[in-house]
Image (spheres, rainbow, N blue to C red):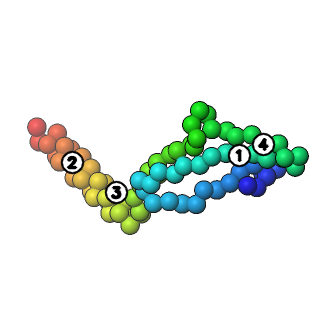
Amino acid sequence: MDYNSTSGLYEVIIPGQAGGICVSYKIIAYDKSGNFAVQDDDRPYFVYQVIPEFSSFIIMPLFMIATLLAVMVCRRKTVSDRTG
């Protein structure tokens, strides 16, 4: 862990994991005198599941299609409002 002098906290970065993976971790702190504390909140480990992310390669075409459909619907509605 590294000390962040701005926040006054110790921090660590958990390496990136694949979507859907469960990550388990435990927090144990030691001092120079040999004292230690365990933060486990009644469970042996903290656990979280990595949420899969869509790559920009997929999101951009989907966004373009959604925008095109929205424009087509708005134009069709505008044309029908003028004629009706």
- Comparing 75 with 24, the one in front is 24
Q: Circle 1 — which element? A: strand
Q: Which mark is residue 36?
A: 4
Q: Amino acid at mark 2?
A: Val
| CB atoms of marks 4 and 2 within 8 Å | no
Residue at the image position 84 percent from the left and 47 percent from the top:
34
In terms of image quadrants, where is residue 59? Answer: bottom left
- Residue 1 in the image, given as x and y percentages of width and height: 73, 55
- Comparing 80 with 62, the one in front is 62
Q: Earlier in the sequence, mark 1 or mark 2?
A: 1
Q: Circle 3 — which element? A: helix
Q: Earlier in the sequence, mark 2 or mark 3?
A: 3
Q: Amino acid at mark 1?
A: Ile
66 to the left or right of 78: right
Q: Which residue is mark 2?
A: 73
Q: Circle 4 — which element? A: strand
Residue at the image position 54 percent from the left and 60 percent from the top:
16
Q: Earlier in the sequence, mark 3 or mark 1?
A: 1
**Alpha carbon distance from label 1 to label 2:** 57 Å
Residue at the image position 82 percent from the left and 42 percent from the top:
35
Q: Earlier in the sequence, mark 4 or mark 3?
A: 4
8 to the left or right of 81: right
Q: Which residue is mark 1?
A: 28
Question: Is label 4 or label 3 in front?
Answer: 4
Can residue 8 be spotted in the picture? no
Question: Is label 3 or label 1 in front?
Answer: 1
Q: Circle 2 — which element? A: helix
Q: Which residue is mark 3?
A: 63
**Alpha carbon distance from label 3 to label 1:** 44 Å
